[in-house]
Image (spheres, grey):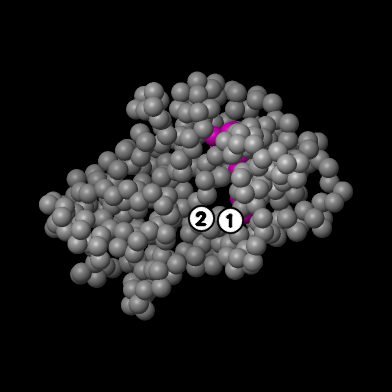
Amino acid sequence: SLIQSQVLDKLNYYKGDLKRRHLFINTMEVFLAHPLLRTIGRSLTLGPRLSSIHSNVNHHDNDELFEHLIVPYFNDEPGYQPSIIHSRPLSLWYTHPRKYSFAYFYGSTNRRMTRNYRIHRQYFLEEVAINWKKVGLIGGKPFILEKIGHDGGSESDIESGQHGEQTQKRYNQMKTYSQSVFCPTLPGDSPPQKRFFDVILAGCIPVVLAFNTTTKATNRLNGGGSRNDRERFEDLGKGVSKHNHISWFSADSNGYTVQDSYPWAKNSSTLPPDREIDYESFVVQIYGGVKNIKPTLEALMANQTEILRRQLELGKVAKYFTYGAGENAHKYEDAFSIMLESVIYSLNSGKDYSG
């Protein structure tokens, strides 16, 4: 391929054991990347992780070991730069007024939703339409459930002809998140979603659907390659997560675990154990499908102590999901600084990498 001949073959030091000292930046979900870049050396990616370094299987002699280091999606909102996040007192994460019990923005439904993991979003909207008709409050607070248009505006904005700037619409969504206690982040096209990190920066507790999963590699990563390729990917994916088999994406063999979907997750072996992020300490996990969202949130809204605990845990880690830009660059502990820490940890302690 051109990538091999025009890029990789021209890297003077990309050979032998030195291959493992290279770092590639793959700024998209793994399965959207060029097939050659999915299993190349060590790379930063939006996930999910399919990593031979973290696999328990025996490798073929001609296999080149690779490692995916998951990083957060980028949020360019000025109000969520590291200087703002760091200057926010920890107490503000739970004393900040919350007008709404939860906020959920959704796009148009389409036929593709019945063929992929977005179907849970449709299930949720149907659940609301059928069983929430007389529900005006959750835990004594109103909730926001609003359709967004192609320009990022809400359905009501579009109907009234007020199209505005997309930036302003985006600001309004983030502001609503910051005024809400909970924010559902239901499955989308890939296990990690930008919305998940956005709501955390806004101080809103993410709500996810939780599934038990078989934890296999997904054929979507193979790009429809040969049968031998598909089998090899599946072998490499077996045993990736050693600690639990919970996915916030799917219950099937494509249901990447939390450790293989989110940056620096607890038990992912991507940072020293005391530096990894315990997402389950603040994320609300809904088992049993969308019908359990309302009763779970109602029970939590009646337990302010538990809400405060989750908000505090969220506030401790939010700084790791913002990238310092401009005057904020390289001044604060942020996504970039912990990313470098993860790379160094990978170089020095990965079981198949020499320091």
Q: Amino acid at mark 1?
A: Pro
Q: Amino acid at mark 2?
A: Pro
Q: Residue visible at 62% across and 49% down?
A: 150
Where is residue 257 drawn, in percent x and y? 48, 57
Judging by the rendered image, the residue that carries numbered circle 1 is 187
Where is residue 268 drawn, in percent x and y? 40, 50
Dot 1 falls on a residue whose secondary structure is: loop
Residue 77 in view, yes or no: yes
Q: Residue visible at 47% across and 28% down?
A: 81
Count up the numbered dots: 2
Left/right placement of residue 21 relative to residue 224 reads: left
What label does residue 75 carry, if any?
A: none
Discs 1, 2 touching: Cβ within 8 Å: yes
Rendered-image quadrant of the N terminus: bottom left
What label does residue 191 carry, if any?
A: 2
Q: CA distance from mark 1 to mark 2?
A: 7 Å
Mark 2, Cα crowd under 10 Å, few <14 / some 14-19 / many 20+, is many
Q: Which residues are magenta?
A: 200-209
Left/right placement of residue 292 relative to residue 189 reads: right
